[in-house]
Image: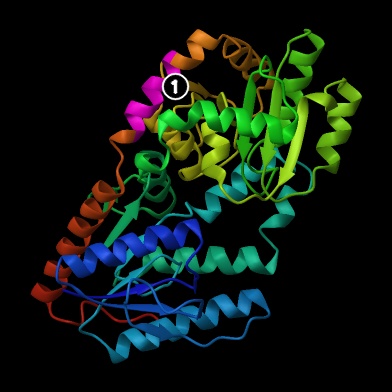
Amino acid sequence: MKVALVRYRYNPHGGAERYLDGLLAGLRAAGAEVALLAASWEGEGASGIPLVRIPVPHRPVPLRLFLFARAVREWGRAHPDRLLFSLERVPGAEVYRAGDGCHAEWLERKRLLRPLSWPLDALRPLNLAYLHLEKAMYASGRLRAVIANSARGREEIIRRFGLPPERISVVRNGVDAALFPLDRREAAAAALRGRLGIAAVEPLFLFVGSGFARKGLGVLARAAVRLARAGRVFRVVVVGKGDPAPYRRLLRDGGAEDHFVFTGPVAGAAEFCLGADAFVFPTVYEPFSNACLEAMAAGLPVVTTAVNGAAEVIRDGESGFVLPDPQDDALLAERMMALLDGDLRRRMGAEARRAAESLTPERNVAETLAVLARAWAEKTAAGTSPGGMPR
């Protein structure tokens, strides 16, 4: 099997790139001949895989997206013996991993955050570019298979783009539970609380994510105000890149500002998971949150929403809680209130860890390779020109 894997930017430190490294290593171990197509990268390369640079201008971003997609298609024309497997929205890809979900779905979900200006979002040049590339990719006659990381994501693709269900495989994200040794929880908790000035008697809820609005920090702040007004003792630690100012105002007006700690981006998020008591992620839209999966691997009960693909691996009331409505701060406060009970947290955390242990990186790679093998068999059986490459 000869595979060309497409990723716009590669660096050796990002979460997506760690996944990519594992996938590339699995492909090579399976005897595949692999090349990585990227516009930019750092380091010596991914798992020793040859890197093919796809040069495009850095700005403007919408033009960059189109030029990258066009250059990848041209490369594919010149190498018809390769299976074009893309992690980006590239019309002409033969296999696509929909790790970012559906952009069209996200724009619709965004109305919860911006009800007045939401109709204008689809007219922004960047969103128009994403929507065009997404639609053209799913309409392409060359597309043989799609990998969704949740059943919800699969349903979105079928509903919005009319793909036959049999062409979309669900391959859930994986996590290496060994990176979250449970025997380190006590030491990690002491270190984290000492670093942030949090008392041992204060249950510690963790939120990790950049892009605070989409990931539900507003509803979390409103839920925290409810708990604070009820006189509950707790802390929320917010890790990630974003402007805390609007949330600080909301918390200050509600008398809950002292309950929050904003750390900004940090290294060593595993230590934060091991040191926390529960994980809260009330996102408005998330294809599949790796942060939730990592929290589960660290033995934390997770509270998230039904529009997060990771909710599919959470048993509501057993390994965490799933909120039907991302904007329901009253229900979120109720679930957080329940998790102030240490015994319940420990029981749920143990169930969460067991669920995460079944979602190994090796399982993810094996299931992805099975999809690629089927697409390769179809491609070779049909010849190297299964349809006209879109221009």
Point 46% across, 59% down: residue: 16
Q: Is residue 266 left or right of residue 233?
A: left
Q: As rendered, which of 226 and 233 lies closer to the eye?
A: 233
Location of residue 161 in the rendering, given as x and y in whole percent from the top left corner: 41, 55
Q: Residue 239 occupies which quadrant of the picture?
A: top right
Total labels: the figure holds 1
Point 54% across, 30% down: residue: 187
Under mark 1, the amino acid is Gly
**Quick one: label 1, few (<14), some, or many (20+) residues within 10 Å?**
many
Residue marked by disc 1: 349
Q: As rendered, which of 245 and 357 lies closer to the eye?
A: 357
Q: In this view, which residue lies farthest toward the bottom?
A: 78
Location of residue 114 in the rendering, given as x and y in whole percent from the top left corner: 75, 43
Point 68% across, 69% down: residue: 125
Q: Is residue 377 left or right of residue 222?
A: left
Residue 355 counted in the magenta span: yes
Quarter containing the C terminus? bottom left
Instruction: Look at the picture and state if 212 lies above or below 134.
Output: above
Instruction: Look at the picture and state if 189 lies above or below 135.
Output: above
Q: Residue 275 occupies which quadrant of the picture?
A: top right
Q: Is residue 301 visible?
A: yes
Residue 341 counted in the magenta span: no
Q: Which residues are magenta?
A: 347-356
Q: Main secondary structure of the magenta part?
A: helix
Q: As rendered, which of 255 and 288 lies closer to the eye?
A: 255
Location of residue 75 in the rendering, given as x and y in whole percent from the top left corner: 36, 87
Location of residue 332 in the rendering, given as x and y in whole percent from the top left corner: 63, 20
Quarter containing the N terminus? bottom left
Q: Is residue 144 visible?
A: no
Q: Is residue 213 left or right of residue 323?
A: right
Circle 1 SS class: helix
